[in-house]
Amino acid sequence: MAGRIEHGARGGALVVGASSGMGAALARQLAADGYHVALVARRGDQLRALAADINARAGGATVAGAYEADVRDFDAAPALFARIAREGAPLRLVVYAAGVMPRSTTGADFTDERDIMAVNVLGAMRWLGLAADFLEHQGGGTLVGISSVAGDRGRPGNGAYMASKSALSSYLDSLRFRLAPTKVRVVTIKAGFVATPMTAGLKLPRGLTISADNAARRIARASEHGHGITYVPGVWAPIMWLVRHLPASVVARMPG
Ligand SMILES: NC(=O)c1ccc[n+]([C@@H]2O[C@H](COP(=O)([O-])OP(=O)(O)OC[C@H]3O[C@@H](n4cnc5c(N)ncnc54)[C@H](OP(=O)(O)O)[C@@H]3O)[C@@H](O)[C@H]2O)c1
């Protein structure tokens, strides 16, 4: 937890899963774009260091605040969300970036699989659901979920992670339909390979892997102008079209 966020020109942005990787890079990008940012994740030290750095770059103004929380604590979310909305600049943008991909899920460790669903799906439903109601009541805003190309088609290995991202993408589709008559936009980010702590140690194809900062710039742009599904980077749209249409016999031989 930490400091009060002052009101700013672009309004407030909440990033859930802001302590590392894409969420942290996006928080920096949004602050640079003029948002005041509320940062949520479990690692309070990382959040406070990030908030301090963002505030220092803003010339000492308080434009970022840290809120330590575990998204699996579903019952605590409404009070924390209300507190962030109360303390921060008027909330315009809510991004759910929290996610886990334990390495052991190439097999079937149910504890890990349950955790994946709790963080990647149920946490997203909790926070984006609260945010949807809030923004609808307020009269507008943007919801963003960081999903993955992994959710576009089940492939061998990592089934729980793929299932979690399919569920998140479908949930975001549903929210978009529900909120279509309102001024709340819903943006689904389907990210490809991004170099972050989540993928550290994995052998990712260099030509298809982008940095967290690169991804954050694309996500910030989509958050501002998008309405629907944005592949990050865009080259994944034709790749995943192809993967969705491949015969099962080919998919069976693909890496997870
Ligand atoms: N990297 C990729 O190639 C890739 C590709 C497609 C999609 N994605 C998705 O992008 C999102 C960001 O991942 P990343 O690659 O940037 O990895 P990352 O650096 O590991 O970031 C994951 C974030 O989720 C937070 N988080 C995890 N469990 C949490 C919990 N129980 N409560 C609160 N926060 C929690 C982490 O914070 P704490 O640990 O401090 O809680 C961290 O801030 C994830 O949803 C991931 O699935 C990643």
Image (cartoon, rainbow, N blue to C red):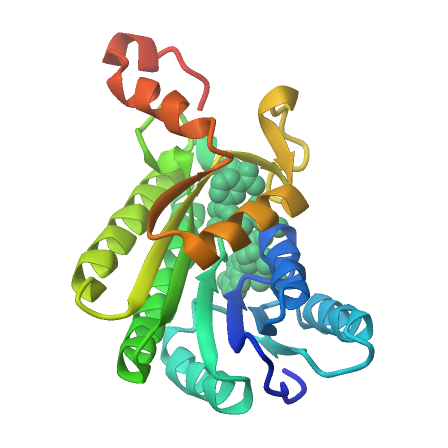
The answer to whether residue 112 is seen in the rendering is yes
In the displayed structure, 47 sits above or below 204; it is below
Q: Which quarter of the picture shows residue 239?
A: top left
Image coordinates for residue 226, horizontal then vertical, percent: 39, 51
The N terminus lies in which quarter of the figure? bottom right
Foreground of the two, 246 or 137: 137
The answer to whether residue 205 is seen in the rendering is no
In the displayed structure, 140 sits above or below 105; it is below
In the displayed structure, 118 sits above or below 151; it is below
Foreground of the two, 188 or 149: 188
In the image: residue 92, left or right of residue 160: right
Image coordinates for residue 230, horizontal then vertical, percent: 40, 42
Q: Which quarter of the picture shows residue 60?
A: bottom right
The C terminus lies in which quarter of the figure? top left
Look at 46% across and 30% down and name the residue there.
Answer: 106
In the image: residue 129, left or right of residue 105: left
Look at 38% across and 45% down and name the residue there.
Answer: 110
Image coordinates for residue 74, horizontal then vertical, percent: 38, 73
Image coordinates for residue 105, horizontal then vertical, percent: 46, 37
Look at 46% across and 32% down and name the residue there.
Answer: 234
In the displayed structure, 192 sits above or below 204; it is below
Label tally:
0
Q: Which quarter of the picture shows residue 183?
A: bottom left
Look at 53% across and 78% down and name the residue there.
Answer: 11
